[in-house]
Image (cartoon, rainbow, N blue to C red):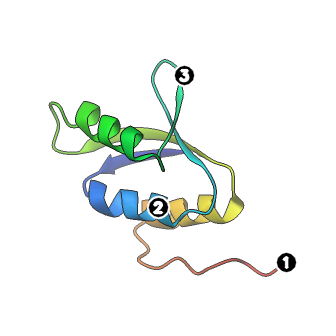
């Protein structure tokens, strides 16, 4: 999944923290970094904001279907995650 033009990194990382499973950032070299790690968050923010005021593009991998939905809701500007869907 790709996210574009992330302007509010604090809100973005709040959404990532709400995810139940692993959420990984895929680097341009193909490395996968766990975004729930505090060290990865620090490195990500430092590298992505060195010359920019917003993150233009992120490629993410989320393994839990509810997390994919949560990130999709964030991407499309929905304020609240509706919760797990009934089976």
Q: Relative to residue 52, is residue 78 depicted above or below?
A: below
Q: Is residue 71 left or right of residue 55?
A: right
Relative depth, front residue between 84 and 33: 33
Task: Assess disc 1: are there few (<14), some (14-19) or many (≥20) residues with their C-alpha within 10 Å of its C-alpha.
Answer: few
Q: Which of the image's four quarters has the C terminus?
A: bottom right
Per the model, the C-alpha gap separating discs 1 and 3 is: 34 Å
Per the image, the residue denoted by label 2 is 17
Q: Which mark is residue 63?
A: none
Label 2 and label 1: CA atoms lie apart by: 24 Å
At label 2, counting other C-alpha atoms closer than 10 Å, the crowd grade (few under 14, some 14-19, many 20 or more) is: some
Using the image, determine if residue 28 lies above or below residue 14. Answer: above
| Residue shown at the point (31%, 51%) measured from the top left | 6
Q: In x, y percent, where is residue 33?
A: 50, 35
Name the residue carrying label 1: 87
Q: Dot 3: few (<14), some (14–19), or many (≥20) neighbours within 10 Å? A: few
Instruction: Give the answer, above or below, for where 12 lies relative to 2.
Output: below
Question: In the figure, 41 relative to 47: above or below?
Answer: below
Count of number-bearing discs: 3
Seen at 70% across and 60% down, the residue is 65
């Amino acid at each position: 999944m790709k996210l574009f033009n992330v302007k509010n990194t604090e809100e973005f990382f709040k959404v990532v923290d709400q995810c139940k499973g692993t959420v990984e950032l895929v680097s341009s070299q193909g490395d996968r970094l766990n975004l729930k790690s505090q060290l990865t968050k620090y490195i990500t923010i430092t590298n992505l904001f060195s010359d920019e005021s917003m993150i233009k593009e992120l490629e993410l991998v989320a393994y839990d279907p509810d997390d994919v939905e949560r990130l999709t809701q964030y991407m499309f500007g929905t304020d609240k995650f509706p919760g797990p869907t009934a089976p």
